[in-house]
Image (spheres, rainbow, N blue to C red):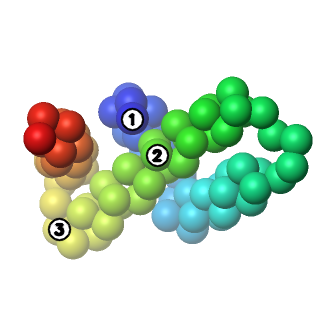
Amino acid sequence: MKVPVIRQFFENSSPEQLNATLEVLEAFCEFRGVSEAEIDVAGEMITNICGALEVHESVKNGAEPREALNAFSQKVMGSIDR
């Protein structure tokens, strides 16, 4: 997870675009012949897209974009510390 990437996805992509990209990446990971390295890269992208979708949802529910990004980051960091 990279907060700058999540911020970029959030600022430049709609939830619909992110969901469409997510579907493509998930399908790509299921192809035979995809290497572990490619799956790792796709997995990182999927993680960042899911983060951006969560930030979009928080903003939709009334949070300020900066607060939503910070809250998401703290939530992830809190789960890592456990």
| Residue 28 locus on image (x, y percent) | 77, 51
For residue 5, what is the image quadrant?
top left
User: In the structure shown, which secondary structural element does the residue marked by tag 1 occupy?
Assistant: loop
For residue 3, what is the image quadrant?
top left
Name the residue that disc number 2 marks: 47
| Residue 50 locus on image (x, y percent) | 44, 54
Three-letter amino acid code at the position of disc 1: Met
* Mark carried by residue 1: 1
Compared across the picture, whether 63 is left or right of 36 comes to: left
Compared across the picture, whether 24 is left or right of 63 comes to: right
**Does the residue at mark 3 contact the one at mark 1 (Cβ under 8 Å)?**
no
Q: As displayed, is residue 63 above or below residue 33?
A: below
Can residue 36 be seen here? yes
Three-letter amino acid code at the position of disc 2: Thr
User: In the structure shown, which secondary structural element does the residue marked by tag 2 occupy?
Assistant: helix
Three-letter amino acid code at the position of disc 3: Gly
For residue 22, what is the image quadrant?
bottom right
**Does the residue at mark 2 contact the one at mark 1 (Cβ under 8 Å)?**
yes
Q: Residue furthest bottom?
A: 61
Q: Earlier in the sequence, mark 3 or mark 2?
A: 2
Quadrant the C terminus occupies: top left
* Mark carried by residue 27: none
Q: As displayed, is residue 45 above or below residue 27?
A: above
Residue at 78% in and 33% down: 35
Quadrant the N terminus occupies: top left
Compared across the picture, whether 14 is left or right of 34 comes to: left
Name the residue that disc number 3 marks: 62
Q: As displayed, is residue 2 above or below residue 53?
A: above
Residue at 46% in and 43% down: 48
| Residue 71 locus on image (x, y percent) | 15, 48
